[in-house]
Amino acid sequence: MDAVPARARVYVAGVVVAALLCLRPLPATDAPWWAVLLLAGLYAGSELVARSRSVGTCYPVLLAGAFLLPPSAAALVALPGALLSPVPRRPFALRRVWRAAQLTLAVWAAAWVHWRLGGRDAVVEPDFPYALVPAGAAVLAFCLVLTLLDGGILTLADHVPASRAWRGLFTRTLGPVAVHGLAGLMMAVLWRSPYGPVAALLVLLPMCVAWWAFAQYHRERAAHQATIRALVQAVDIKDGYTRGHSERVGRATMMIARELGMDEERVETLRFAGILHDVGKLGVPTRLLRKEGALTPEERRVIELHPEYGHEMVRGIRFLGEARAAVLHHHERLDGSGYPYGLVGDRIPESARVVAVADAFDAMTSTRCYRRARPVAAAVEELQRCAGRQFDPRMVGALVRALGRHGWHPSVTADGTPTLPTAAAIPGRPRGETTPDSVGRRAV
């Protein structure tokens, strides 16, 4: 949304109009306005704290409003916090207006569903477990509205294809919002109890502890990412011929891992493995990495030490987990002819077998200064031909299925305008060139 297209601005304007229509019955609404103001102020303060700690949005207060107030009054609770909370990028005003309109519609839908199912009486009584039914329906409505609106803005503002814009949005939203919905229901029940609003505020205490823990995790994760970026940038500076290669291998590794059904935590670990697989090149003399001619046997042996160099560099970084084994063994081959240890078959760690396929695929499909990229179909055919001898067939099959599902976009693989090789470059050893007999043996 940095440079917002006109159609996206029209879409935002339409959502704003719909949000204003949801607020239109306000003068005739029989609502305790002190409760509206208290919840709106509480949400605004919670939102400012949550955003400053990078822990998302304080949905419990919004959903408590949906469980306590008529739809139009509940929708009003979201406005101050959404309009005042910080946004990460320009255009700031448009992003704030969009966020306010989106949350207004979502809270209105949740409150409307809750009231239509008799949720107000179930909260006042309170009537458990029936109170969970309208509350659960309200959470589903809240998530559905957020999903529909988010997918629309992704399509119109960020040019995400419509076939992918809504994929997975609802399921990723539902889990966290369901937890916040339970907290919001507890707030609403305590609010209506003899203990009053002060007791309801106590529900936020465990949420604050959870926010603090998540903020600590977020900071640690940011430190991890900074460590990896620094290592990758150092490799790219040293060997400009493969600039961007590490990030693309990380992306291909994620595609394979997800296709194999691995959990997201392991997918992230394997992404680190793909990004850092060539970090050992920092220990290889630059003159060898940039040598134009063919390598001598002695020079090749020096370059083939880069997996061991890389493993030494990262073995003390605990959060990398099994990614460290992938850095060490990504040049092993199933038939035992790889390096550094000549491991055979299943003795090669699974993470290394994933990275080997991703590495070879990107080497074949990347444009380098000495040759054009191979078409994806040709690279896939080569991987399939070498499966069972050089690559794990299961990993190759997973990559093929993932490519069929998601594609592999030139913007990811291109390193600039392709340049045809010169006559002097053709006889030499093309760095990173993948051939039927050199996939997995190539040093760079």
Image: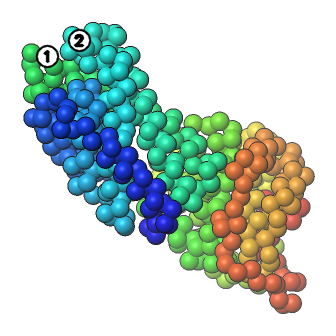
Residue situated in front as seen by the camera: 190 or 114: 114
Q: Residue at x 25, y 47 (%)?
A: 79
* Residue under label 1: 193
The figure's colour scheme reads: rainbow
Residue 70 screen position, x and y as percent:
25, 29
Which element type, helix, strand or loop, lies under badge 2?
Answer: loop
Going by the numbered disc 2, the residue's amino acid type is Pro
Task: Give the residue at x 32% y 29%.
Answer: 111
Specify whether 288 is left or right of 233.
right
Identity, as a three-letter code, of the amino acid under mark 1: Ser
Give the side of residue 327 with respect to residue 110, left or right: right
Alpha-carbon distance for marks 1 and 2? 9 Å
Which quadrant of the rendered structure holds the N terminus?
bottom left
Q: Decide if residue 395 is on the left or right side of residue 34.
A: right
The circle drawn on residue 126 is 2
Compare marks 1 and 2 and give the one earlier in the sequence: 2
Image position, residue 310 (x, y; %): 59, 61
10 Å crowding of disc 2: few (<14), some (14-19), many (20+): some
Residue 160 or residue 227, whichever sits in front: 160
Q: Residue at x 36, y 51 (%)?
A: 16
